[in-house]
């Protein structure tokens, strides 16, 4: 944990500990609190946690730190950098959410050399492209509103929201960030530097 | 670049956010707008007109775009009675 974070947490504690922060992680914390949930484990580097797919098609590296249940409204802020998608049909995905009826996640993909965004919906039968394209380096904000069952992705002025119905199958699909190789050459990677999850 | 659909001979611009399959999308990419039937709007310069004439915009739709055009119309001067009729209708102007 860096000095700035220590001071901030100390300040919050001094103010009565009324923080709504449910989980906060910085790469300087090491692997504490980070769960690897796919075939390839992430690796810690000097400037961030590296999620890098393997060389075989569809190999995936994904993490899922302590995410609250869907009965809690919360905001997850993921600070990341250096998305690399050298091959066709690889993707870096944020927040995979699935119910029996719908699913939603935001991906940056590379299709025939062209960067595109993608989200999935309705039993994964429709792969939709054309929402905002996640930056190579940036801060992704994801909000879950339990009262309206609305999931919102936002980055800068861009956003998309989905109202998700159906019973949650959340336990089967717990990924906050993933790097997955598609069909083609090269590894897909992204580096995570900070994650913060707050109760709303 | 603005995107629009041509409805009743007028451009209806892309809403922001746009609703697609129950997803509300802020600042959508152009590819999504195209997929939803919106086309890029091409604006053109209004023509210079002589005194007594005015440029009136028109809109046409091509395969690729919504295109602004112009026609030149003569400006007809209204007399006071006609102007009152346009503003307030027949009944109001016929009150004695």
Image (cartoon, rainbow, N blue to C red):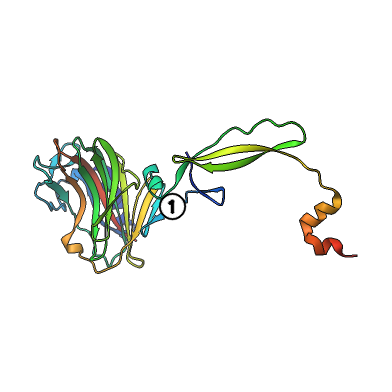
Q: Is residue B51 left or right of residue A147?
A: right
Position above or below: B6 against A166: above
Q: How many marks?
A: 1
Position above or below: A116 against B47: below
Q: A30 or B18, which lies in front? A: B18
Q: B10 or A1, which lies in front? A: B10
Q: How crowded is mark 1: few (under 14 residues within 10 Å), some or many (20 or more)?
A: some
Q: For the point 77% across and 32% down, which residue is it?
A: B51
Position above or below: B12 against A48: below
- The percent position of residue A36, horizontal first and vertical second, equals 12, 51
Quadrant where the image shows the N terminus of chain A: top left
> In the current view of this chain or complex, which residue is farthest to the right?
B96
Query: Secondary structure beneath disc 1?
Result: loop
Position above or below: B74 against A35: above
- The percent position of residue A33, horizontal first and vertical second, equals 16, 53
Q: In this view, does B20 lie to the left or right of A82?
A: right
Quadrant where the image shows the C terminus of chain A: bottom left
- The percent position of residue B64, horizontal first and vertical second, equals 44, 39
Can residue B26 be seen here? The reply is: yes
Q: For the point 35% across and 68% down, which residue is it?
A: A147
Can residue A1 be seen here? The reply is: no
Which residue is the site of mark 1? B17
Q: Is residue A9 left or right of residue A64?
A: right
- The percent position of residue B56, horizontal first and vertical second, equals 66, 40
Q: For the point 68% across and 30% down, which residue is it?
A: B48
Chain under numbered label 1 = B
Q: A20 or A77, which lies in front? A: A77
């Amino acid at each position: 944990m860096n000095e700035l974070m220590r001071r901030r947490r100390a300040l919050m504690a001094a103010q009565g500990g009324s923080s709504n922060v449910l989980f906060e992680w910085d790469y300087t914390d090491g692997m504490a609190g980070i769960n690897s949930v796919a075939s390839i484990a992430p690796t810690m580097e000097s400037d961030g946690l590296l999620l890098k797919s393997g060389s075989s098609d569809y190999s995936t590296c994904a993490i899922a730190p302590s995410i609250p249940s869907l009965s809690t409204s919360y905001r997850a802020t993921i600070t990341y950098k250096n998305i690399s998608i050298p091959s066709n049909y690889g993707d870096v995905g944020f927040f995979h959410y699935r119910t029996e009826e719908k699913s939603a996640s935001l991906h940056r993909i590379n299709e025939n050399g062209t960067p595109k965004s993608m989200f999935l919906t309705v039993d994964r039968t429709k792969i939709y492209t054309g929402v905002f394209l996640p930056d190579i380096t940036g801060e992704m904000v994801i909000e879950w509103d339990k009262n309206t069952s609305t999931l919102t992705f936002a980055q800068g002025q861009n956003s998309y929201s989905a109202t998700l119905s159906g019973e949650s199958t959340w336990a089967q699909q717990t990924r906050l960030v993933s790097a997955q190789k598609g069909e083609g050459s090269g590894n897909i990677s992204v580096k995570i530097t900070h994650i913060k999850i707050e109760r709303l | 670049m603005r995107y629009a659909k041509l409805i009743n001979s007028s451009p209806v611009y892309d809403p922001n956010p746009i609703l697609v399959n129950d997803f509300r999308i802020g600042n959508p990419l152009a590819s999504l707008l195209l997929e939803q039937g919106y086309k890029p709007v091409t604006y053109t310069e209004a023509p210079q007109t002589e005194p007594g004439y005015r440029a009136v915009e028109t809109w046409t739709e091509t395969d690729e775009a919504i295109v602004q055009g112009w026609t030149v119309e003569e400006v007809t001067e209204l007399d006071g009675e006609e102007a009152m009729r346009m503003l307030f209708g027949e009944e109001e102007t016929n009150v004695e």
